Image (spheres, helix red, strand yellow):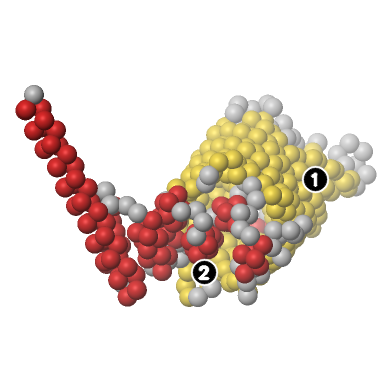
Amino acid sequence: MYKKIILFLVIIIFAISAYSQEVENATTIDKDTYILWLAKDWDRLITIGKTAIKNGVDFYYLRVRMGIAYFEKKNYHKAIYHFEKAYKFNPNEYFLKEYLYFAYLYAGRQTEAGIFASSFTQSQKEKLKIDDGKFIDELKFTYNTSFNDDQSTTENYSISVAENKDGFQQISKKLDYFNISLKHQISPKFSIFHGYSNINKTSFLYTQYDSVAEENSNNKSTLHQYYFSMNARVAKNFNMQTGFHYLNIQYTAEDTTSRQGQVTITDNDFLGFLSMYKDINYFTLGGTIYYAGLNDAKQLQSDVLFFFYPFGNVNLYFVSTLSLQWEKYSTNQPTKQFVFDQQIGIKLIKNIWIEGHATFGDLHNFIKNDGFVVYNGLDVIKQMYGGQLIIPLKSAFQFRVDYSFITNESSFFPTIPENNTYNTIQYNSHSITGRITWNL
């Protein structure tokens, strides 16, 4: 009996001693981190804070100071982690809410920032200039021009296909693209994005029917497009996006039945997609699946995306995308191809970013950027690389200019599709894109 009493007293003494030591450690950490916070010694504050948390010392002001330290070092991903921990301790401190809101914003997590800001009072929103009552949140204007830099491909065109094989070959000469897009933030967790695009294209067209050959050095085609997508935040740091892209193609071709000259032909193509994105510290993981009917074929494409922010901000970032596409023409066996796309973005100086990008693999009836970009030209893009300059103009405007160097491959298309390739011609083209984004 006496042994049990003694053992119980020993346990109580050890518990009181451990608790006293923990309180003493927490008090010391609170004092030390407060002094470092006043001195703005962020590196030492982070070192002491990490050790304290590892040893089980955790309290509200420690997380706040750790968050501020990372915020001041512009590591917004780590700042978010600690601010969210502090918010669980005390969700009523306004200055903490403000810090967390801007950490979301500067980390590129606009959806989370908007959702978090929806809980602010009206005076808080006015102070931070948050306007959540707009019908249009974003307006984009984009113009692109692309051109063939080798005129000899069309001026000295020659064909090496049997005369009795019906079909055609097209070589792009010039393309002009215009797009206007709108974003509507219906609620903090739900937004709509849609836009209209128009493409006018000039191509060299060779046709061969019933052993009669025709050349048209200025064949015209027009493409009207409408894109629509919906984005929903279905869980914390988890977004789902779905939508469609409609394409109306109009082009001129020789009337091979009555030989009465050229006629206008209209085709309608369509694609749908579903995307999911998950934000994690320093990373965003994404996946997209597409189903499309482009150029008289069916396509099923899946993308895996990996975003990496090594410094916890957008001063340096990497975006890697691996795509696998299956394509099936009615008369051919299905084919599949892999495409890899890599982007690297760097902040040069204040408010100026540059991006480099390279794409490897055959871009034929290929889809990118959640279905917004469609490579449905008859020529195959074999390789594409270039760079982009991003310049925010004040707080509401952003200007982008992009240059791409493209290696293309043109082939003769038999009227009845085959797996064989005829009369392959390679040529290079240049693409220049300008875009203005206006956040209303």
Q: Which disc number belongs to residue 248?
A: 1
Q: In the shown orientation, is residue 220 left or right of residue 84?
A: right
Crowding at label 2, few (<14), some or many (≥20) Cα neighbours within 10 Å? some
User: In which quarter of the view is residue 298 placed?
Assistant: top right
At numbered mark 2, what does the secondary structure look like: helix, strand or loop? Answer: strand
* Disc nearer the start of the sequence (1/2): 1
Question: Which image quarter is the C terminus in?
Answer: bottom right
x then y, percent, for residue 137 = 71, 59
Look at the image and tell me whether residue 172 can be seen. yes
Residue at x 53%, y 72% (from the top left corner): 352
Q: Nearer the viewer, residue 301 or 15?
A: 15
> Which amino acid is tagged 1?
Asn
Residue at x 75%, y 59% (from the top left corner): 134
Disc tally is 2
x then y, percent, for residue 88 = 45, 49
User: In which quarter of the view is residue 83 placed?
Assistant: bottom left
Q: Nearer the viewer, residue 417 or 325?
A: 325
Residue at x 68%, y 26% (from the top left corner): 331
Q: In the shown orientation, is residue 192 left or right of residue 400?
A: right
Q: In the shown orientation, is residue 320 left or right of residue 239?
A: left
In the picture as drawn, the residue positioned furthest to the top comes out as 1
Residue bearing the label numbered 2: 353
> Which amino acid is tagged 2?
Trp
Mark-to-mark CA distance, 1 and 2: 35 Å
Residue at x 34%, y 73% (from the top left corner): 38
x then y, percent, for residue 427 = 60, 56
Crowding at label 1, few (<14), some or many (≥20) Cα neighbours within 10 Å? some
Q: Nearer the viewer, residue 86 or 398?
A: 86
